[in-house]
Image (cartoon, grey):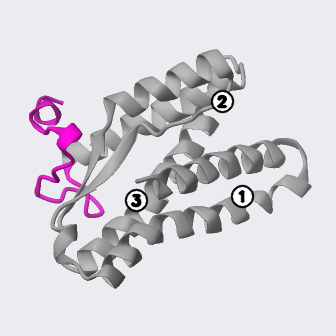
Amino acid sequence: FKQLAKVEPEKGVAVHRQPFLAGFSAVELGVVVATSVFLGMAYMMANQINWADPALFVTYILVAGVAIIVPDLTHRYVAWKYGAVTEYQFWFLGTAIMFITAFFFRVVYAMPARLSINDSDKLSTRQQAMVYCSGPLVSVLVFGIFMLLVPLGGFAATIGLLGASMNLLSAVYSLMP
């Protein structure tokens, strides 16, 4: 995580790094894993779920991973298609707000990371709209897929509601300037 400290996420500057796996750099993969764990833990805190239950812990982390990865991969793909450089970055303030709202208000309101896009001002207005709307649209689609699990009841309903909630948060959060 030493390289992570060198990036200034508050400025939102994407650093072009060597891809390691699935187009992500090693630093970005570390951020994805860490933020998936943090998001899952925040939801467990908000829902007052015991972190010591390994099955629920893994479930929350995996569902959080889907909620984090899918929309940001979509953003990245569309931005790459138009020639913009992107980087998935840890966001300390978002993480702090996420845990604070989960603890005090029993609702998760923030995301622990964000995607920085360089040269977005060089894209046409239509291209910018495609890049910025792609993630929320996919989050809404994944929200709908998770909602299909709810009528099944039991553990499937738990996963469905959790995934739907996380993807709805991702969609709304992605629409904020």
- Give the residues in magenta: 1-25
Vertical side of 154 occupied by 72: above or below: below
> CA gap, disc 3 to disc 1?
18 Å
- Three-letter code for the amino acid on which mark 3 is drawn: Asp
Q: Is residue 149 left or right of residue 171?
A: right
Q: Which mark is residue 146?
A: 1
Q: Secondary structure at mark 3?
A: helix
Local crowd size for mark 3, using a 10 Å CA cut-off: few (<14), some (14–19), many (≥20): many
Vertical side of 45 occupied by 70: above or below: below
> CA gap, disc 1 to disc 2?
19 Å
Query: Where, by quadrant of the figure, is residue 109 drawn?
Result: top right
Q: How many marks?
A: 3
Pointer 2: what residue?
107
Q: Is residue 121 left or right of residue 111?
A: left
Residue at the (47%, 32%) spot, across then down:
37
> CA gap, disc 3 to disc 2?
22 Å
Q: Is 152 in the magenta?
A: no
Residue 130 locus on image (x, y percent): 40, 78
